[in-house]
Image (cartoon, rainbow, N blue to C red):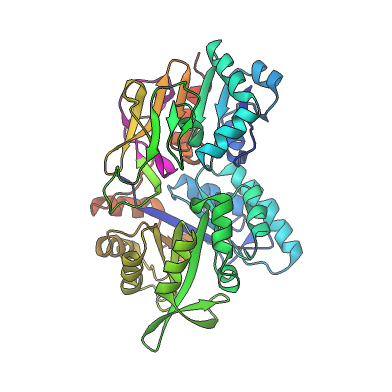
């Protein structure tokens, strides 16, 4: 069973449907026992960083997630969920993240040419930067769906994929059993389902 | 590089897709779920569902069908039609919509876009606007294109984007249904005015019209159409191939 961590933000409906479509049982939960029993964890997220990390901390689930990861359980952060894996974010202030992957989250604005629209929204091709088990069913150049205005930087050591949007934008990261996708696998058609399937099969 | 998006639009009444759809390989041509799956499998980049139901019973049916569509389609889903309040946003987002399209609702209550963007994020709020030339001016029309609001379209669009609309669907009443191409003049002006994604609607008659659109206006993000896709005049996977042959970046998928 995959636990989709519910800390009161975002629409988790399509994530559950995606996992169901690949035959994986998933539960939206904030219950510590359920999270501990789960085979793997997914940390979703939409909205603003400060608000989301506060809700996660207030629920006490940040500690539970860190402990489970330490015990060897695989974790995938998606979109804002990925951004929360890093040390820090500068979205409307300065906030401390979970610190599971080194790097920080900054505005796209100023980091990409001015003529490009923000948010970075739509389908973009993945460029592999490093091997990762979550890519075992897909190929370089496959398209995934992005919607974001902030991006992760200074995370070269853990970078596994980028997408070209006026520069190489962090698309996916991995540090051991911790994975992060800036794009939405649950909105990326068959390619997204294949990434989720590969994640569900990680050791 | 980000790809140009191709978006089929489906009108739903009482839980069924209307305006006649003509696919040989579908058993139930008016099932939103079947059509959603079909479009998703032939590389549509997004789906738009418009609820054209007037009754509250119809609304309930729409909610049920939306849930079923969302559970079966793993591409972005935009929902419009009858969005007048934040509760309407809530209602369709809870059923699995990713974005909500507002048209007359924003004209009636200009604060709606700002309030929705604050609550759900800019990326969730799509302004849909029907535009027609009147006395040499681009005017905003309401009520499905029947009523001239007297408002100038470009300043209306700019105002809505400033309030928080994350995308704009521009439907030209002048070119809609004529099938002689998109309204390049209007769309160019909109793209010059705002820096959020702009989606062209109204006028596509064939693949060449999409090629013209993306060649003439490199800044435009997407093309939306209904009947030419529904009647199989243009197959989306073929269209994507033609776009790529014309050096327009479009998402291809395997096994189509």
Could you tell me if residue B73 is visible in this image? yes
| Up-down relation of residue A165 to residue B107 (above or below) | above
**Residue A142 among those drawn in magenta:** yes
Extreme bottom residue here? Answer: B135
In the image, what residue occupies the spot 65% across and 21% down? A35
Give how far across and how far down residue B51 sits, in percent: 62, 63
- How many numbered dots are placed on residues in this image? 0
Say whether residue B95 is visible. no
Residue B252 screen position, x and y as percent: 36, 44
Quarter containing the N terminus of chain B: top left
Residue A183 in the magenta stretch? The answer is: no
Viewer-proximal residue among B63 and A74 = A74
Up the image or down, A26 lies above or below B57; here it is above
Residue span colored magenta: A125-150
Q: Residue sitting at 48 percent across and 23 percent down?
A: A198
Instruction: Identify the residue at image location x=31%, y=50%.
Output: B241
Instruction: Please identify the quarter of the rendering in which residue B254 is found.
Output: top left
Q: In this view, does B190 lie to the left or right of A83?
A: left
- Which one is nearer the viewer's eye here, A129 or B116? B116
Report the quarter where the C terminus of chain B lies.
top left
Q: Residue placed at 56% from the left, 36% from the top?
A: A52
Residue B191, relative to residue B73: is it above or below?
Answer: below
The x and y percentages for residue A170 are 35, 33
Residue A71, percent from left and from top = 56, 10
């Amino acid at each position: 069973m995959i636990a989709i961590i519910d800390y009161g933000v975002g629409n988790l409906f399509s994530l559950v449907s995606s996992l169901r479509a690949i035959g994986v049982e998933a539960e939206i939960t904030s219950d510590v026992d359920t999270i501990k029993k789960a085979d793997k964890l997914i940390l979703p997220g939409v909205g603003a960083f400060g608000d989301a990390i506060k809700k996660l901390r207030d629920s006490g689930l940040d500690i539970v997630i860190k402990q489970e990861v330490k015990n060897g359980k695989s974790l995938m952060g998606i979109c804002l969920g990925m951004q929360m894996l890093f040390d820090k974010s500068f979205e409307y202030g300065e906030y401390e993240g979970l610190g599971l992957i080194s790097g920080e989250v900054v505005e796209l604005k100023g980091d990409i040419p001015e003529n490009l629209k923000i948010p970075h929204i739509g389908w973009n091709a993945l460029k592999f930067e490093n091997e990762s088990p979550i890519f075992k069913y897909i190929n370089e150049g496959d398209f995934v769906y992005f919607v974001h205005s902030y991006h992760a930087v200074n995370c070269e050591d853990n970078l596994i994929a980028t997408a070209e949007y006026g520069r190489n934008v962090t698309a996916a990261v991995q540090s051991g059993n911790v994975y992060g996708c800036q794009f939405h696998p649950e909105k990326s058609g068959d390619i997204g389902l294949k990434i989720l399937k590969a994640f569900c099969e990680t050791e | 590089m980000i790809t140009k998006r191709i978006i089929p639009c489906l009108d739903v009444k009482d839980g069924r897709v209307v305006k006649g759809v003509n696919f040989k390989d579908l058993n139930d041509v008016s099932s939103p779920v079947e059509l959603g799956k079909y479009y998703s499998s032939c590389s549509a980049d997004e789906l738009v569902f418009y609820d054209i139901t007037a009754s509250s019973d119809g609304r309930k049916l729409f909610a049920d069908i939306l849930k079923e569509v969302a559970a079966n389609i793993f591409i972005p889903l935009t929902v419009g039609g009858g969005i007048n309040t934040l509760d309407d946003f809530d209602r369709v987002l809870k059923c699995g919509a990713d974005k909500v399209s507002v048209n007359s609702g924003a004209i009636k209550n200009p604060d709606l876009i700002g309030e929705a963007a604050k609550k759900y994020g800019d990326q969730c709020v799509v302004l849909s606007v029907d535009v027609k030339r009147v006395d040499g001016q681009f005017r905003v029309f309401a009520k499905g294109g029947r009523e001239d609001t007297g408002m100038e379209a470009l300043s209306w669009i700019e105002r809505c984007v400033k309030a928080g609309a994350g995308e704009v669907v521009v439907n030209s009443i002048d070119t809609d249904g004529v099938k002689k191409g998109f309204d390049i003049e209007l769309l160019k002006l909109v793209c010059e005015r705002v820096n959020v994604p702009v989606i062209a609607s109204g006028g596509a008659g064939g693949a060449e019209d999409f090629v013209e659109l993306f060649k003439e206006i490199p800044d435009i993000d997407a093309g939306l159409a209904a009947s030419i896709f529904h009647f199989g005049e243009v197959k989306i996977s073929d269209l994507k191939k033609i776009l790529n042959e014309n050096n327009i970046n479009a998402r291809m998928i395997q096994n189509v």
